[in-house]
Image (tube, coloured by chain):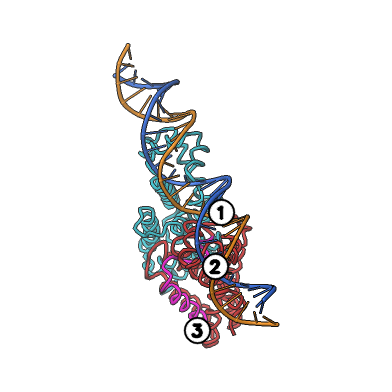
Chain colours: A red, B cyan, C blue, D orange
Amino acid sequence: MPTKDEVTLTPGARRILDVAATLFYERGIHAVGVDTIAAESGVTKRTLYDRFGSKDALVLAYLAERDRRWRDRLDAALDAAPSDPLSRVDAVFEVLAQWTADSGRGCSFVNATAEIPDPDHPARRLVREEKRWLRERFEWILADGSVPDASARAATLLLLHEGAFVVLSAGQDPDAVPAARRAARALVQEAVESP
Amino acid sequence: MPTKDEVTLTPGARRILDVAATLFYERGIHAVGVDTIAAESGVTKRTLYDRFGSKDALVLAYLAERDRRWRDRLDAALDAAPSDPLSRVDAVFEVLAQWTADSGRGCSFVNATAEIPDPDHPARRLVREEKRWLRERFEWILADGSVPDASARAATLLLLHEGAFVVLSAGQDPDAVPAARRAARALVQEAVESP
DNA sequence: CACCTCCTTCACAGACCTGTGTACTCTAGT
DNA sequence: ACTAGAGTACACAGGTCTGTGAAGGAGGTG
């Protein structure tokens, strides 16, 4: 069963959102105009505004869909992984490895933060929520595996995860994600083996 | 003795660069036009173009100056700190804590990366260089303190450092930098105490 | 048949963008 | 007194930006 969003989107709107997602991610939100999006979607600007109302709303739809897809992917990976904390944490970083394999432009949420100064903007709320969600996922993994100091260690895992994304994109270091994965594994192992 | 850049800048150019730095950082590079920068500097657009040549060059000057100031500050802190690796690593995160105290909009280099897609753009080269420099600083600190696996551990420290910046700005978590600092200290301590 | 949704074409508004051309003034140094 | 550098004033070019208005076509459903 497809998600509600996907059902309610008309074919034209679906194309618009797909094109917008690609262009916003690859060129930046401010750098892409609605004219370009409409033209690349084979649609007129009128249709774009009829479907989404504003560029701002289109930006929000782009981020919300990306957020949903990423969470679904991560939850699926966690469901498929063994239930020990080491396997689960490793699964999160495996998803990151796959995700970044075809996303060379960094984290779309971090990029959106860079382009949207207002912290009360709906897109910024979405970004905060996404980071908070991942942090809680880590915390749940550790607590469920009876790892001590789950909260503090989850915070560290989040730092490694986000650090990997930014060192990969801004620093252009291809080893960033593997390095974060190794550090995360070491952190969990050390925590499990400690008294 | 002032640096060469500061000497060669005319008073007008100095004001332009200061204003541009503030506006680029707070509102984003694309979102700020040269008209605004000129007006806020109490200078005409003509002067801006006579001094800097293009908006692109002004952007580069902004990032280069910020880079220089940050490195100077970090080097000064490292000089002032005791020479053991724990104190030195802690000093780096202390600088981060101070730096982020009045920089709520994240890392300007990461933000610039989000807004400039072309990896060959001079600004992007500068960003890469900055991240590489910090990584090497960490590596030097560890190796100089005879910490084993200095290279791998330096990579982890860089991840924590960059992660803190992004979790603070995108995730709006005020504990991000202290958490990274604690994790970094723990990492160094564990490495020093290990056989 | 009428009706509705989706979408089209096209013109237009009004603002903002980077960048330039021309001609002028003020100030400091030699 | 002369000159060079720094800056001012201001118009203008040529584009792009978001967003709207008016009118109509294609295709399915009652």
Q: Are marks 2 and 1 in contact (CB under 8 Å)?
A: no
* Cα gap from disc 3 to disc 2, whole angstroms: 31 Å
- Give the chain letter at badge 2: A
Residue occupying the point 56% across, 81% down: A75
- Mark 3, Cα crowd under 10 Å, few <14 / some 14-19 / many 20+, is some
Q: Amino acid at mark 1?
A: Gly
Could you say which is closer to the camera, residue B65 or residue A157? B65
Q: Which corner quadrant holds the C terminus of chain A?
A: bottom right
Residue occupying the point 54% across, 86% down: A84
Q: Which residues are magenta?
A: A88-112
Of badges 1 and 3, the one in the foreground is 1
Q: Check residue A62 in the rendering and tell me which mark sits there, or answer none.
A: 2
Disc 1 marks which residue? B104
Q: In this rendering, would D23 be left or right of B126?
A: right
Q: Is A93 covered by the magenta stretch?
A: yes
Q: Amino acid at mark 2?
A: Tyr
Residue occupying the point 44% across, 32% down: B11
From the top left corner, tell me how far across and down residue A24 is, in percent.
48, 63
Q: Are marks 3 and 2 in contact (CB under 8 Å)?
A: no
Q: Is B61 covered by the magenta stretch?
A: no
SS for dot 1: loop
Q: Amino acid at mark 3?
A: Ser
Q: Tell how many labels.
A: 3
From the top left corner, tell me how far across and down residue B125 is, in percent.
35, 56
- Mark 1, Cα crowd under 10 Å, few <14 / some 14-19 / many 20+, is some
- Give the chain letter at badge 1: B
